[in-house]
Image (cartoon, rainbow, N blue to C red):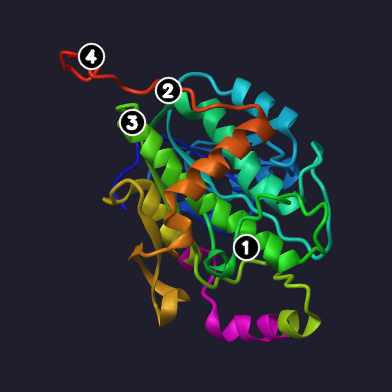
């Protein structure tokens, strides 16, 4: 990793797991890091183990009010936003605003946060997804699981597919606005981070827990795709993940998401839904012929 002196990087969920590992690596290279975390005690404990300048600020992605307070407290511009935080639950739960918890936290919370901060970001927005997106779909008729039988892993997959659709649509909008900021996404592969897999099946959950020590890499290995997406030489719209064993682990590299994740019509539809639900909008105006230096004729 090149020297990061002079950069300020916000990491959501930076108090544990992959977020903590990424934040530690960035601060060790000279970046000023802001840990945006729900649990302040955990955040301060994590910051105490890191080198360099590390700030800890409260952020609950399951609350739009908390997201707005956090965004209002960020003064001036900063380099990179890493949308890392995530949750998984084995039963239907809801956010403070009534959203299904996984969709509300993993996608809608980061969607709102990004839009509220975007006109102060100078370099990149990185959103962490998962290979769980490959078997998922967005149910636009019932995205909050109000009528369907709740499937925990199905809801998780929906939220992770939403992360990718959001990132690709964000990149399209940034290009249309003539912005130098790029959007990229990453997935950690199979990482042993203490993040408990809850598929809704006790058998599958037990099997995953038993296989994790043998097959998974640790938080540092899991953070490599995020770090490459955040500071590496990658094009906008990239999806970064481990390059070996079918994407489970190994060196980080550009990889291919599912075809569903790159569907532009789905991405625009999800964006419009997310705007309505969060009350936030893409803050940059589209570039016209005149602003691009054309004649407008």
Which residue carries the number 2 mark?
284
Q: Position of residue 162 (x, y in %)?
A: 57, 51
- Assess disc 3: are there few (<14), some (14-19) or many (≥20) residues with their C-alpha within 10 Å of its C-alpha: some
Identify the residue at image location x=55%, y=63%. Answer: 133
Per the image, label 2 sits on a secondary structure element best described as loop
Which numbered tag is attached to residue 176? 3
Q: Which residue occupies the foreground of this view, 272 or 118?
A: 272
Dominant SS in magenta: helix
Specify start and end residues of the magenta stretch as a single range: 207-221
Which residue carries the number 1 mark?
157
Cα distance between the residues tagged 2 and 1: 29 Å
Identify the residue at image location x=35%, y=36%. Answer: 5
Which numbered tag is attached to residue 290? 4
Task: Note whether 206 is above or below 78 in the view shown.
Answer: below
Q: Earlier in the sequence, mark 4 or mark 1?
A: 1
Which quarter shows the C terminus?
Answer: top left
Of circles 2 and 4, which is in front?
A: 4
């Amino acid at each position: 990793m090149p020297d990061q002196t002079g950069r300020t990087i916000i990491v959501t969920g930076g108090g544990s797991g992959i977020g903590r590992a990424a934040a530690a690596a960035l601060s060790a290279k000279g970046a000023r890091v802001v840990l945006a975390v729900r649990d302040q005690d955990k955040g301060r404990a994590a910051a105490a183990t890191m080198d360099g300048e590390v700030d800890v600020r409260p952020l609950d992605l399951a609350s739009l009010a908390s997201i707005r307070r956090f965004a209002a407290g960020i003064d001036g511009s900063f380099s990179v936003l890493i949308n890392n935080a995530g949750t998984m639950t084995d039963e239907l739960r809801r956010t403070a605003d009534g959203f299904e918890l996984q969709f509300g936290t993993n996608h809608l919370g980061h969607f709102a946060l990004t839009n509220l901060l975007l006109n102060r970001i100078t370099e990149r927005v990185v959103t962490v997804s998962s290979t769980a997106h490959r078997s998922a779909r967005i149910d636009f008729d019932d995205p909050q699981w109000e009528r369907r039988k709740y499937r925990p892993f199905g809801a998780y997959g929906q939220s992770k597919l939403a992360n990718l659709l959001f990132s690709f649509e964000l990149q399209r909008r940034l290009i249309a606005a003539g912005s130098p900021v790029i959007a990229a996404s990453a997935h950690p592969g199979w990482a042993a981070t203490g993040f408990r897999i809850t598929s809704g099946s006790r058998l599958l959950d037990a099997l995953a827990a038993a296989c994790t020590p043998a097959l998974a890499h640790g938080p540092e290995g899991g953070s490599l795709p995020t770090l490459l997406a955040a500071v590496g030489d990658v094009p906008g719209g990239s999806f970064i993940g481990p390059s070996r064993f079918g994407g489970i682990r190994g060196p980080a590299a550009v990889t291919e998401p599912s075809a569903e994740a790159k569907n532009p019509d789905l991405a625009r539809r999800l964006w419009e839904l997310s705007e309505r639900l969060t009350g936030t909008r893409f803050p940059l105006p589209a570039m016209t012929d005149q602003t691009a230096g054309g004649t407008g004729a």
